[in-house]
Amino acid sequence: MLIIIVIIAFIGAGMLDLKLRQKFNIEKNQKFMDQYVGIWHLFLEVFLCFSFLSFVTVNLFDQTTIYALLFAFIMLLFMVRGLFEFLFRRDKRRHIISFTYVALCAVCSVAIALFM
């Protein structure tokens, strides 16, 4: 069941990404670092990743909870990214895609919690 949810999420994310980029005329990233507002944004996301990994390593969770927490964490990363893009790069309108990914991750998290 988990693999079905993940496949649906990836297909949905790809379709939403294409539609939003066409509708709002949002450019794709040219380089890897284009997705970050600044170097401090990169370091914040790396710190959040290490914090999440240490939290999951220290605490014991069952399989369903781990997957739900993973999507919740990805949702948190996209929330932070969307907020920074909204505050500092509003003219590029990439925050629209980031906040759409937040909603998609929330749906996946709830679906995993309900169906697994």
Image (cartoon, rainbow, N blue to C red):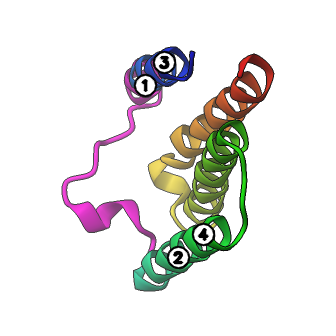
Specify the amino acid type for callout 3: Gly
Residue sitting nearer the eye, 112 or 29: 112
Q: Which of marks 4 and 2 precedes in the sequence?
A: 2
Q: Is mark 3 on a helix, strand or loop?
A: helix
Q: Position of residue 40 (x, y in %)?
A: 48, 85
- Magenta region includes residue 73: no
Q: Residue 57 carries which label?
A: 4
For the point 48% across and 18% down, the residue is 12
Q: Which of marks 3 and 2 precedes in the sequence?
A: 3
Mark 2–mark 4 contact, CB under 8 Å? no
Q: Which of marks 4 and 3 precedes in the sequence?
A: 3
Q: Which of marks 1 and 2 precedes in the sequence?
A: 1
Mark 1–mark 3 contact, CB under 8 Å? yes
Mark 4–mark 1 contact, CB under 8 Å? no
Q: Which of marks 1 and 4 precedes in the sequence?
A: 1
Q: Is mark 2 on a helix, strand or loop?
A: helix
Which residue in the protein does label 1 denote? 10
What whole-number distance in Å separates the C-alpha atoms at marks 3 and 4? Answer: 30 Å
Which residue in the protein does label 3 denote? 12
Q: Is mark 1 on a helix, strand or loop?
A: helix
Specify the amino acid type for callout 1: Phe
Picture quarter with the C terminus: top right
Which residue in the protein does label 2 denote? 50
Specify the amino acid type for callout 4: Thr
Observer-side mark, 2 or 4, equals 4
Q: What stretch is highlighted in magenta?
A: 15-37
Picture quadrant of residue 76: bottom right
For the point 63% across and 36% down, the residue is 105
What whole-number distance in Å separates the C-alpha atoms at marks 4 and 1? Answer: 26 Å
What whole-number distance in Å separates the C-alpha atoms at marks 2 and 1? Answer: 24 Å
Does the magenta stretch mainly form a helix, a strand or a loop? helix
